[in-house]
Amino acid sequence: MAYDKALADRVRDIFDNRPYVYEKTMFGGPCWFAHGNMAAAVLSGGGAMIRVGDDDFTDLVLEPGAEPMVMGGRESKTWLRIDEEACASDERLREWIERGLTYAESLPRKSLARPVTAAAA
């Protein structure tokens, strides 16, 4: 199943003008990294995946449209799947993306094996 290209464009617009954020295709769709730490992704099955801290997870998973991301048969405690309805409004999407970005920015920077350029992203 293909990812929602319109949703990906909306996420790109949110991350625009942040030179430390780059995009890479993984899991069948685009993912965004801040200083080498993954912050968010548009999922091939619809909706988005957002990285949050352990401290915020318990509260955020209770928000409408949010649920733990299941990876390898296990529920994640730091990744949330955000359904299509919760991504429908620009305001709500921005809130979710900013949460993922804020958490990724709080993590230690990762050194990249090679610089990521706009053409490679």
Image: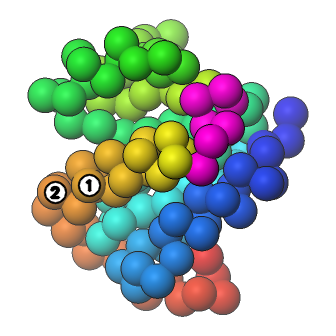
106 or 85: nearer the viewer:
85
Image quarter of the N terminus: top right
What is the three-letter code of the residue carrying label 1?
Thr
Badge 1 marks a residue whose secondary structure is helix
Examine the image and state in which quarter residue 108 appears. Answer: bottom left
Mark sitting on residue 40: none
Badge 2 marks a residue whose secondary structure is helix
Task: Please name the residue that numbered disc 1 is placed on.
Answer: 102
Instruction: Look at the picture and state if 47 lies above or below 18.
Output: above
Examine the image and state in which quarter residue 105 appears. Answer: bottom left
- Looking at the picture, how far across and down is residue 103, in whole percent? 24, 49
Task: Please name the residue that numbered disc 2 is placed on.
Answer: 106
What is the three-letter code of the residue carrying label 2?
Ser
- Between label 1 and label 2, give the one nearer the viewer: 1
Residue 77 visible to an observer of this rendering: yes
Image quarter of the C terminus: bottom right
CB of mark 1 within 8 Å of CB of mark 2?
A: yes
Instruction: Look at the picture and state if 21 lies above or below 6.
Output: below
Instruction: Look at the picture and state if 77 lies above or below 44.
Output: above
Compared across the picture, whether 65 is left or right of 27 comes to left
43 or 27: nearer the viewer:
43
- Distance between mark 1 and mark 2 Cα atoms: 6 Å
Instruction: Look at the picture and state if 104 lies above or below 45.
Output: below
3 or 96: nearer the viewer:
96
- Looking at the picture, how far across and down is residue 80, in whole percent? 43, 27
Give the residues drawn in magenta, as a range: 84-90
- Looking at the picture, how far across and down is residue 100, in whole percent? 36, 48
Residue 40 visible to an observer of this rendering: no
11 or 51: nearer the viewer:
11
Instruction: Indicate whether residue 120 is drawn in magenta.
Output: no
